[in-house]
Image: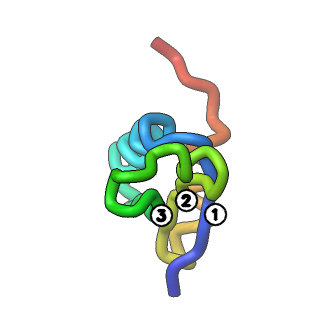
Amino acid sequence: MIVVVKVFSNEIEAGIAQQVLQSGGVNAFIFKDDAGGMEPHLQRTAGVRLLVNRVDAESAHQILEAPISI
């Protein structure tokens, strides 16, 4: 089963979070309903969802909440 981990206001932020999760070993997927890119403003109103498998949800939350060090 797939669950929503977080909702973002744009695809760029969701993509960064997806890469962070994948670097941590969690497969993540982005779901957005913006009419195939024809209506990008819908990302702000409907949001861009970051999805993971239910078994990875807790790990995903921990990874996303961890402080980032550069």
How many labels, in total? Answer: 3
Q: Secondary structure at mark 2?
A: strand
Mark 1 vs 3, N-terminal side: 3
Q: Residue 43: x percent and y percent?
A: 54, 49
Q: Is residue 28 above or below residue 54?
A: above
Query: At 63% across and 35% down in the image, what residue appears?
Result: 66
How far apart in space, not on screen, are marks 2 and 3 (Cα)?
A: 9 Å
Identified by mark 2, the residue type is Arg
Q: Residue 31: x percent and y percent?
A: 45, 64
Q: Is residue 11 visible?
A: yes
Q: Secondary structure at mark 3?
A: loop
Identified by mark 1, the residue type is Glu
On the rendered structure, is 7 left or right of 70? right
How far apart in space, not on screen, are marks 1 and 3 (Cα)?
A: 25 Å
**Mark 1 in CB contact with mark 3 (< 8 angstroms):** no
Q: Which residue is mark 1?
A: 58
Q: Residue 29: x percent and y percent?
A: 39, 62
Most foreground residue, 5 or 47: 47
**Nearer the observer, disc 2 or disc 1?**
2
What is the crowding at mark 1: few (fewer than 14 residues within 10 Å), some, or many (at least 20)? Answer: few
Most foreground residue, 27 or 50: 50
Identified by mark 3, the residue type is Asp
Query: At 34% across and 44% down in the image, what residue appears?
Result: 23
Q: Which residue is mark 2?
A: 49
Farthest residue, direction front = 38
Q: Is residue 5 above or below residue 66?
A: below
How far apart in space, not on screen, are marks 2 and 1 (Cα)?
A: 16 Å
On the rendered structure, is 53 left or right of 23? right
Q: Which residue is mark 3?
A: 33
Query: At 44% across and 43% down in the image, what residue appears?
Result: 11
Q: Is residue 69 above or below residue 30?
A: above
